Amino acid sequence: MAAAILQIANIIGKQKEAQAWLSRYDKKAMQARASIGTLIGDKTLLILRIVGGKLRVYGTDRNIGCVLYQDLQINLPEEVKGIKWRKNIEMEELAKYEADFILIMCSSQKNDQQLWQHLQTSPVWQNCLAVRNHQWYPIDVFPWIDYSALSHELMIDHVVNLFVPSTKAPM
């Protein structure tokens, strides 16, 4: 994202402002890493989304994966390392993506809500480590799927609120 911000800043003559924002963002990410790092440590986190009647895993590039896996340096499951942006998976494949924590988004569309209900009652979901340990969290689509400077900052705030007990608030 930094390259895109700098490229746009060059076009509109706002290089100084872009550098200042990037510096503030890097500092915020570093502080968040320190806050959540002591709680999460080397545990893994899986990002899931139910959309279009499909189950999707998010990887390391763009939006939510970029912030969590790159900026905050949260560990991802081994199977996710080969996914750059996102990948649709079958529900039965979920076991290959074993993680200590799961963040899951689901659209309000009827077929997605039906899949979510089906997933929650399935042995595949019930056998997930994060589910067994009550370490899965439903999250809204915004700001997690947006790809903007504002959404990246908001994601950091939400992750800290989610994982740091003294700052937990409803999302």
Image (cartoon, helix red, strand yellow):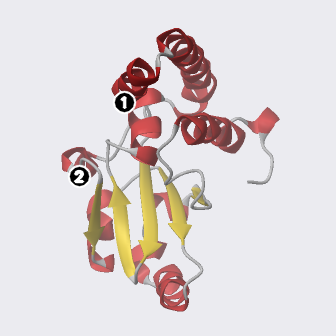
| Rendered image quadrant of residue 7 | top left
Mark 2: amino acid = Glu
Q: What is the number of the mark on residue 111?
A: none
Give the residue at x 42% y 81%.
123
Residue at 54%, 12% in the rendered image: 23
Quadrant where the C terminus lies?
A: bottom right
**Residue in front for this viewpoint, 27 or 102:** 27
Q: Is residue 77 above or below residue 54?
A: above
* Mark 2 residue element: helix
Q: Is residue 102 left or right of residue 78?
A: right
| Residue at point 81%, 33% (across, down) | 166
Quarter-wise, where is residue 24 in the image? top right
Q: Which numbered tag is attached to residue 4?
A: 1
Badge 2: residue crowd in 10 Å (few <14, some 14–19, many ≥20): few
**Quadrant hosting residue 149:** top right
Quickly name the residue at label 2.
79
- Image coordinates for residue 117, horizontal then vertical, percent: 55, 86
Left or right placement of residue 140 versus residue 5 in this view: right
Q: Residue furthest front?
A: 12
Residue 135: x percent and y percent? 58, 55
Q: Is residue 112 above or below residue 164?
A: below
